[in-house]
Each structure stands twice: as C-alpha cells, then as structure tokens.
Amino acid sequence: MNKIPTIRVRIPKYHIGRIFLFPMLLYFMLVFPVLAFMILKSFPELKDKSGFITEVRSDSTGQHLLINTSDEPVTQFKEGFKAGLNAAEKAKDSISTILADSLTNAIVGAEGDSIAEPALATSSGIKKKGTSNAFSDSITSLFKYVILFSTIIGFAVNLPFKRYFRRKRLGKTISPKLYRYCRRYLLFTPIINSGIVLMAFMVVHGIMIYQLQSPAAFSDEIGRRMFSNYLFISLVASLLTVLFIYFWQKHRVHIRYIEHIFTRDELQKRIFGKNTGKIRNRLYIASAMTTLLPLTIVLLYLILSLTPIKDMGEVSPGEMRIMLGRLSDVLGPDVELTKDSELSSLYYISAFDNALMFGGIISGVLVSFIYILFFVNWSTAGIVRPVNELVESMRKTGEGMLDNYTIVRTNDEVGVMSEGYNMMTSRLREYIFKISQMNEAYSRFVPSQFLEFLGKENFVDIQLGDQVQKEMTVMFSDIRGFTELSEDMTPKETFDFINHYLGYMEPVIRKNNGFIDKFIGDSIMALFHEKVDDAIDAAIAMRHSLNQFNLDRMDSGKPTIDSGIGIHTGNLMLGVVGGEGRMDGTVISDAVNLASRLEGLSKIYRTSIIISEDTLIKLENPSKYNFRFLDIARVKGKKEAVYVFEVLDGEPDEVKTLKIETKALFGNGIDHYKNKRFEDALKVFSEIVRVNQLDSVAAFYVNRCKNNIQRGIPDDWNGIEVFDAK
C-alpha cells in the first residue's frame, strides 16, 4: 500500500449532501419569490383576459375537475390556489407537481384558447386544451435533473472520498485502489461537482429556451414575458449556485483535505498547476458573488415593480395626483395625462407593487447576506490560515527546527510565498547540513574541545595566538618496532596499517572522555580534561583493543604488534600556533614532554603502561587499579627525577595475576636495589622471574643487578636512574 502522510491533525469528515443541497436551496430562495412576484404582478392582466380557476371538484373516476369563472377574481384566485394545493397534497404529488399546478393555475387563463371549457387535473400534471405547459415542464425538469440526477451522480463520484476519510478517521486499512482514486481526483472535485450541477442546469435552461423560441408554446405575450423573466432570473441564480458549489468544495479541498492525501514532499510545492492565480481575482469573484449577482436579482424586482403610466389610459386629476405626487401641483390642473402625452412614458409604483418589491428586495438581501457570510469565511480561511501557518513555520525555523515546512494550500501569491519559504528552508537546511558536515570535518582535524577550552563558538572565531592554561592528563602511545615493521610494507600498506590500528584506538579514547590532539606517525597524543581516571581507563581499554587488533592480524597471517603508553598529569598551555597562512591547535608544556618520555621508558622497562607520581596521587579511585612502584628516573630534558609506576591492568590476565601475587616480593627487590644490596635484589628478582617468566620488568632488574655487581656503581649513586635517550 502507498505510504499515507502522517501529519498529526484531526481527520475531517468529507461532506457530500450539503455541498449540493444547500446551494440548490439558495437557488430556490432566489427564483421562486421572483416567480411568485411575477404571477401576482400579472394577475390583473390574466383576470381581464379570461377569468380564473376558483374551485376544484372530483368526478366519479377520482380525477380533479378545475372550474373556471370570472366573478370576484381576487377571492377566487386565493380559493382556487389553495384548492389546487390541497388536491395535490391529497393525491400525494411531488413538490414539482404542486408548484407546477399552482403556476399553471395562475397562468392558464392567459394562455388558453377557451377558458370556459373545463381542464382536467391529474396526479401527473394539468392537461389543458390549447394551452402551453412551459412552466410545468421547466419546473419538473428542474427537480428531475438538478435535484435528482445531479445529486445522485455527485454522490456516486464523491462516495470514494467519503469512504477514504471515514476509514482514515477510524484507523482502518485503505486499499491502494481507493488511495489512487482519491489522490488522482481530489483536486478536480470542485470542477467535477460544480460541473455536474452546471450540466443539469444547462439541460433545464436548454428546455426553457426551446420552449421560449417555440411559436406554439405561448398563445399570449403575457405568458411569454413572464416565462422570459423567469428564464433570466433562473440563469443568474443557477450561475450563483454553480459558483457557490465550486468555491465551497475548493475551500474544503485546500483547507481541510489535501494534507491527508498528498505526501509531505508534494505539499511543499504547489500541486494545483503552474498557472499562478491572484488574490485580487479571488476578491473580485467574491465581490461579484456577494454583491453584483444578488443585486442583479434585486434590480429585477425593481424593474418588475414598475408600471407604465400609458397602460392606465386616460386618468382623472385625482388619479394623476396619486401617480405624480406633488409634481402635479407644479404642472398645473390643466395638464391631462393621456396615452399621447409626454408624461405617459413615465412609470409608477402602486402600493401593492411597493409591498411586493420590498419583499423581493428583502429576500435578495437575505440571500446576499448568506453568500457574504460564506465567502468572507472562505476568503479569510483561504488567506489567513496559510499566512498563519507560514508565520508559525517561520517561528519554528527561527528556533532551529529546520526540518519544518508549511503546506502550500493556494495557487495565488500566498501559495507562491509559501512555496518560496519551503524552498528557502530546504536550501537553508541543506546549507546548514553542509556547514555541519564541514564543522564535523574540521573537528576531525582540530578537536571541538579546543573551541570549548578557548571559549569560541565556531572555528572562524579562532585567532592566531589564542591560548588557555589548564591542568590536563597527557597520554602518549606508540607502536613498538614500527620502523622495522614498515620496512616490509609499501607506502599504501603502511597507511592502511596505521588507519586500521587507529580505527581501534581512537574510539576507545573518545569513549573515555578524551580527545586526540595529534597523530605523530604511529604515535598518538591524547588529552583528558575531566578526570585522571579517564586516562587510565582509556589506556587499559587500548591494551584490550590491541589484543583484538592482533587477532585480526593473526587471521590475516600477519605478525602481531605491541605498544607502550606513558601518562602524566600537569598544567599545560593549549592554544593556536603557526602563521597567517597555516595555523594549528596544539598544547605546549613540560607535562607533554614528560608524558612522551614516560612512553619511551615503557620500551626500556618492557612494560605496557607507565604513569607518573602526579597522575597516581590525583586519581579519584586509586583502589580501582592494580599498580606497582617501578623506579625513580630522571629523563632527558628534566632536572628533577620522577617516581614512575607500572599499571598492571593492561597486561594479559595470566601475567597480571602473577604480577599481583608477586607484588610484595617485587617491592622487596626494589628496596634492596635502591639500598645498593644488589646481591639480595638479584635473588628476589630471580625468584620473581622463576615464578613469572613473562615479568619483563623483573627480568630487566635481574640484568641491571648483574651489571652493577660486575661493573660497580659510582660513589655518588643515589638510586636515581638517568636516561639521556628519548
């Protein structure tokens, strides 16, 4: 199954019914009040021509007989209208039949050839001899195509989206087929949904236009004029309905749905096409939808409420004063208002027309207010929410959350800005990643601890001469006999050997809170700044890692190697040396030189780890380690002698165990030796060698005792061994 985005937001519901039904309700709120207004407006003309239906009677077959008369038209109109509705309700007719019956009842007299002949009303409609069914057919087709067919088709098209979001909301598995369908068509649902309703309206209006153009459809200009006005208002209302569905669905897709279908990488760019929209155009459309189009309907109410004065014929002075108001006083009493006068081209509004006009205007304003509420909400959410998300993403980026992005929800300037921000963040993330890689690479050459000790935040802040004094433990490690070993290797093999060896040693030092200051050929110089115990632990671990390294070499058929380690603790200067063209971080101190000399002593005494007295006395937990006194030595470059000790924990287990068992005996031998009792010392060290043949230090003292017995010692010898070699 395709990977679904995992953005932590509440899964919304996918609405189908309200997207179609509510805009259609607004359509009827716009159209039917106008239609009723036109019927009431034209009622006097209909009455003068043919009278009106007054009652409905049922015959023996159960059909309804509509009876026509011309007496008391207003009262008869009301009674006939109510009777038609009651008859339709009893017959359980559909909404379209009720409206069609009412409208036909209102206009049948104007279009019929002989209203005296009875018309037959059935449950399927009204059949009248010689009269057009234009209104009835148009309303029936409106309910048939717009309400029924478009809703069914729209529900079928949108049902997969509803299933997808319901299953996602419930945490159920989504099939790949369903996911591909939603992913492919989600962005097109605004066009699809509005297009379905648009096609239905086109069919209905096509039928209406055909009826309007048909010569036999209307027998009177009154019915044709009413149907023409109805067609006009229906066209405007249908356009509002289609646009309402389009923008409502588009709002929900962009604001609620896209982050639950498209991936994170896709949402960082505009997924709506390459053509950039404009906020200005969106506001223009919103203004037209909320003001111009609803006002067009209001304007139609105003036009329908006007009555030409010439239709009144000759009027009396009193009637003229009613129609012209106080203007009649200015014109004078001799002015006559006839069909041939100039004033006959004017219009007037009667009291009844005025009431109907205001009712229609209120209806239009109400619908306009509903449109304004929706479009203001859509426009606000379509602009404010992406901007707020962008601002929030900027805040997170400013706080260092570089793996952050904002969803590109629109195709306008806000979408371009969001896409640009995501691109900037991506490039900034890549740039910072490269900088981090460079810093990491720099730290491999110059340890990052140098920055901390020098109080610098990054490498560019380091200046030549920056330095700091600090007490640290210095460790030197060196491979025994590396010069002879490298003679049998090519330069590449030498590099591979050193890198292989250092690959074992460097992690051990780093793991024990140390850092390598530099590599000197096969030698390692490391510093430990937290505590002395870390250096001893690192030295012991390095000896264990050396055993693993030797096992690898034995498996490859290569000889094993050995190493020596010297450790000393003291004050040192850490800083930057060099010139403007080349600088390097290093440490300079007598402590560094002494640690190097102690490593050299490990070769002479043929032991693995040697530490100074300063290191030993600064251990936090000396009982943790096994060590023994080794000698008092004055190395080259030092005027004062230093007490040196051997750490036994770095030896193989069998050697370590025997050295610990003979530790007291070894101490006695050292005591005899320092007090010039070389024969006694020789016996002690020989006994140690007999017990532990791998105790190279005891063997070293055996040879030294023999040399002193045979050659003698200077008269001023005080037990301090002087080493002039490095």
Image (cartoon, helix red, strand yellow):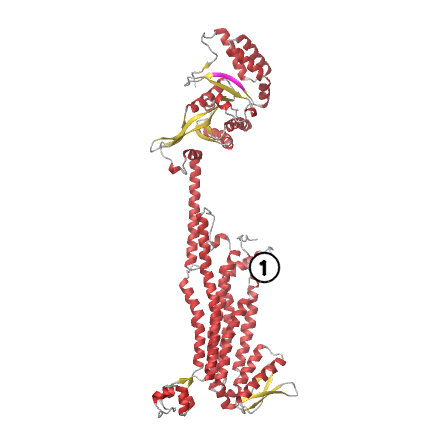
Residue at 53% over, 69% down:
22
Residue at 54% over, 80% down:
137
Q: Give the extent of the magenta segment.
A: 628-632
- 165 vs 333, left or right, is right
Q: Residues within 10 Å of mark 1 (few under 14, many from 20)?
A: some
Q: Is residue 629 magenta?
A: yes
Residue 456 point in image, percent of width and height? 40, 36
Q: Which residue is at the front of the view, 279 or 331?
A: 331
Residue 123 point in image, percent of width and height? 61, 81
Against 214, residue 166 (above or below) is above
- Is any part of residue 593 visible from this angle? yes
> For the residue labelled by badge 1, is the local secondary structure a helix, a strand or a loop?
helix
Against 229, residue 580 (above or below) is above
Magenta-colored segment: predominant secondary structure: strand
Q: How many marks?
A: 1
Residue sitting at the far left: 580
Residue 525 point in image, percent of width and height? 45, 27
- Is any part of residue 261 visible from this angle? no
Residue 1 point in image, percent of width and height? 57, 53
**Image quadrant containing the C terminus:** top left
Instruction: Give the residue number, with chain letter if any, for mark 1.
Output: 166
Which kind of residue does numbered mark 1 sit on?
Arg
Q: Which residue is at the front of the view, 352 or 229?
A: 352
Q: Is residue 63 magenta?
A: no
Against 77, residue 601 (above or below) is above
